[in-house]
Image: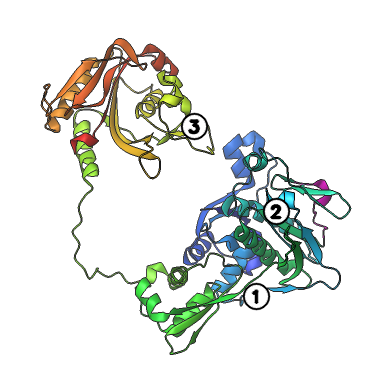
Amino acid sequence: MPTVSVKRDLLFQALGRTYTNEEFDELCFEFGLELDEITSEKEIISKEQGSVKAAGASDVVLYKIDVPANRYDLLCLEGLVRGLQVFKERIKPPVFKRVMPDGKIQKLIITEETAKIRPFAVAAVLRNIKFTKDRYDSFIELQEKLHQNICTDNHLKQYLHIIENKPLYPVIYDSNGVVLSMPPIINGDHSRITVNTRNVFIECTGTDFTKAKIVLDIIVTMFSEYCEKQFMVEAAEVVFPNGKSYTFPELAYRKEIVRADLINKKVGIRETPENLAKLLTRMYLKSEVIGDGNQIEIEIPPTRADIIHACDIVEDAAIAYGYNNIQMTLPKTYTIANQFPLNKLTELLRHDMAAAGFTEVLTFALCSQEDIADKLGVDISATKAVHISNPKTAEFQVARTTLLPGLLKTIAANRKMPLPLKLFEISDIVIKDSNTDVGAKNYRHLCAVYYNKNPGFEIIHGLLDRIMQLLDVPPGEDKAGYVIRASEGPAFFPGRCAEIFARGQSIGKLGVLHPDVITKFELTMPCSSLEINIEPFL
């Protein structure tokens, strides 16, 4: 869910009243939002960079509000305030109109070469708009939020791949040949706007026509309230390479008809059509009862691009009614629940591992490439790891292919604890698999480590025997039994590694870890480990 940061005092001023933190939290919940954090710029910088860097930063209280990812109209202060005011029935939803200019219409012409790279463009004009510092900041931030949610990402480096291998780079320039921007990378200094700007020409280019139109509609509907003629947006013409021209923004209103009994059935309530229409109107969906008295006609404004299907309307009715107000009822059909077999086996093993004196840990499913490759003496290409395309940090680059690094990092963070350290984890690892529809597959692994002044191989070996006893797998070479055979592995000390075979297949390895592995994980004492796949025992 995207998070919108707004200044508390500015928000209350726009709402026309003040709230306590608890009251505003409750209001957000009623509206389907969540007040995630109450902080300040100074507090944020202090947490991230230290108190020295935070000196001189603003103490203005900020509300961080979690907004549903599909509610593009709530990604800025203007939309948030408007939505809450309509929800509390303090104002009626404004009507947005596209108007033609008094003089010559502004044109955006797409050349044939540009269309091969950025085929679609839309444009509009906000005429005689009045910015303040806060309005200007909100205008800029909304563009970034829209890029993060409906487009791709707001970081410059994330845009470069879009055009870096193209034969030509798209450029927008004015009638005098002055470059305005290089979409989607960066805007030009000539087209920079300030708080003193009164007329704003807005263009949006893209490879998805629908998304481009949605982005334009959201921006102009949010900020047209600051124009001299409120909620009026000046049209602009876009000429495509085939000679056809279109006028934007569309600001299209459409109507949907939903039966009241359908809403009542899906939500689990018993409300009259009139009450349901009132609930929907509070959610920025102007509604009225028509026809036989059981039909509700809903007007979908250009700000609600998230309304695609009747189920979206039903959801908004449920939010307005209040989830906590829906009476809980027992289902009319009998169902017999059953625990997922793999999870049941996992739970049973967890209890017995703890009974054996081992402490359970839960580590991250994502890790760095170094953790599963370099530190274990393996090449990353040999791990069949699933890579994250845009990792936020170096610590979360790939999905783990083994549980061992997580346990070793846990030991490194708890080296001051009394020895021995006996840890285990039973969780999923992820391996690339071209035979699956998603290209990867999860496997449930059990991993245990013993860290002490001596390697403790016999402890780990004894743990394996106990696990097999619990799984009713006897020792032996036959297909029903298990056996360990001498093996080698880059993560293990030479001659101190064994491969485990059970029911005719290899299920994992155990052994004493190599000194290089121990050193790379910032450990100083010997360590033995065991890791097996428990799925064959279902």
346 is higher (above) or lower (below) than 260: above
Residue 395 is labelled as 3
Q: Is residue 78 left or right of residue 490?
A: right
Image point (24%, 36%), residue name: 535
Magenta extent: 187-198
| Relative image position of residue 83 (x, y in whole percent) | 58, 68
157 is higher (above) or lower (below) than 194: above
Residue 140 is labelled as 2
The residue nearer to you, when weighing 72 against 167, is 167
Residue 353 is labelled as none
Taking the image as drawn, is residue 50 in sight? no
Q: How many marks?
A: 3
Q: What residue type is disc 2 on? A: Ile
Residue 531 lies in what quarter of the image?
Answer: top left
Magenta-colored stretch includes residue 237: no
Q: CA distance from mark 2 to mark 3?
A: 31 Å
